[in-house]
Image: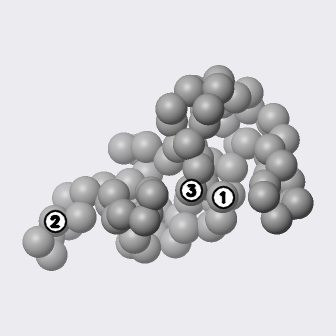
Amino acid sequence: MATALANLDKGEAIKLDDGTQLTLNKAVELGHKFALKKILKDEKVIKYGEIIGLARKDIMPGDKVNENNIRSQDLGGKS
């Protein structure tokens, strides 16, 4: 996962550190997150090495990551 350092437009191509290119599926505002790789439903979502939640559904590379597609990880329950 990555954090936008500027406002990014839907369809914008982002060059990754490994030289590959990722196309954004939606606009991503400054400070918001987007997926660099596929995150499967119920998989842990990690930001800066910390678990910030679980995927509510499959999240595709280039998708914006927010409360619509992740949920808090709690004590075993599903929220």
Q: List the residue tagged with mark 2.
A: 74
Amino acid at the residue labelled 2: Asp
Q: Residue at x 56, y 56 (%)?
A: 1
Q: Secondary structure at mark 2?
A: loop
Amino acid at the residue labelled 3: Met
Q: Is residue 63 above or below residue 36?
A: above
Horizontal relation, residue 15 to residue 29: left or right: right
Return the x and y of residue 37 as percentages of the image width and height: 65, 65
Return the x and y of residue 33 as percentages of the image width and height: 53, 43
Horizontal relation, residue 51 to residue 28: left or right: left
Quadrant in which residue 47 is drawn: bottom left
Q: List the residue tagged with mark 3.
A: 1
Instruction: Out of 34 and 69, give the one closest to the viewer.
Output: 34
Q: Is residue 72 visible?
A: yes
Q: Residue at x 78, y 58 (%)?
A: 17
Q: Are marks 1 and 3 in contact (CB under 8 Å)?
A: yes
Q: List the residue tagged with mark 1.
A: 36
Instruction: Out of 73 and 56, give the one closest to the viewer.
Output: 73
Quadrant in which residue 46 is drawn: bottom left
Tally the marks.
Answer: 3
Measured in 3D between alpha carbons, the distance from the residue under mark 2 to the one under mark 1, in whole angstroms, is 25 Å
